[in-house]
Amino acid sequence: MSSPKKGNVVKYNKWGYIFLLPFIIVYAIFQIVPLFTTIFNSFFENYRLMGGLTQVGPNWAGFKNYIEMFSNGDLVDYFTNTMIMWVLGFVPQIIVSLLLGAWFSDPSLRLKGQRFFKTVIYLPNLIMASAFSMLFFTLFQDGGPINSVLISMGILDAPFKFFSNAWSVRSLVALMNFLMWFGNTTILLMAGMMGIDPSLFEAAEVDGATATQVFYKITLPLLKPILIYVMITSLIGGLQMFDVPQILTNGSGDPMRSSMTLIMYLNKHLFSKNYGMAGALSVLLFIITAFMSFLVFKFSGNKED
């Protein structure tokens, strides 16, 4: 009697693999093949001269693209720019999301209009980054509404040049990323908080624990898996930062390329048809993303004694 059951299990497993086959095919075509193609192209000299009229290559170049990329000091500066703008946006994002998540998921507060506020804080996530960037460019330009209000209030005597100061541009990029993503992070953290066993909070209340102690001793440790997920996905998104600074600075990364990110640098190579250098930079970006994600997971995970 046992052999028919075993046969049925094998048969069902076969159908499971068949249903997974479309996903595997699509993943291979749009992820695996481009990855290996990019790695392959990074070892070739392949670009255009004279405004794209003259094609050079593809010629085997070995590690020439990588050596040229590292010998150029701009790479470190652009990586630093990317990480600065990511940190400036991520730190307030995670703090605000934790506070909002704790408030909305706390039944003792009995907050009214929770559905409305949840919808409002998530709405910026639905707005295209290009629209956000154009809005901020209009608001913060020299003759824009922000400068007009500050001058009328007597805070400024003359318009402040937001786009001529490195830290103001970086702050604007970080602010836009914060506004676009804190709602999504809040929903994720709130879902995690609502999944925590209420008996733990009740036991802590009986033992006389304060709200701060409950948050740090119960809520945060149990939210660790979600926090790791949020940090890794945010880090990957930060390293791929492109649309907001690209539109806000019209692709220049000014002032003095202080807002130029790694992907903007990559885009310049693609725009100039330098596929070999673009491939090398893409491979490097892939390695950096994988390494930093591993570090976050390694040092944030549970340590076994």
Image (cartoon, helix red, strand yellow):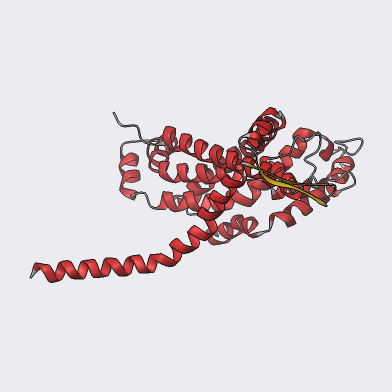
Q: Position of residue 253 (x, y in %)?
A: 77, 40
Q: Position of residue 57 (x, y in %)?
A: 71, 46
Instruction: Identify the residue shown where x is 42% and y is 50%.
Output: 192
Instruction: Name which quarter of the figure residue 288 lies in.
Output: top right
Instruction: Identify the residue shown where x is 55% and y is 50%.
Output: 35
Q: Position of residue 138 (x, y in %)?
A: 83, 51
- Residue that sits furthest to the right in the current view: 158
Q: Position of residue 4 (x, y in %)?
A: 13, 71
Left or right: 238 in relation to 260: left
Quadrant holding the N terminus: bottom left
Identify which residue, 111 or 85, lies in the foreground.
85
Vertically, is 198 above or below 63? below
Identify which residue, 67 or 150, lies in the foreground.
67
Left or right: 140 in relation to 101: right
Residue 107 visible in the shown view: no
Residue 105 visible in the shown view: yes
Instruction: Identify the residue shown where x is 75% and y is 51%.
Output: 133
Vertically, is 107 above or below 260? below
Instruction: Name which quarter of the figure residue 287 lies in.
Output: top right
Identify which residue, 177 or 117, lies in the foreground.
177
Quadrant holding the C terminus: top left
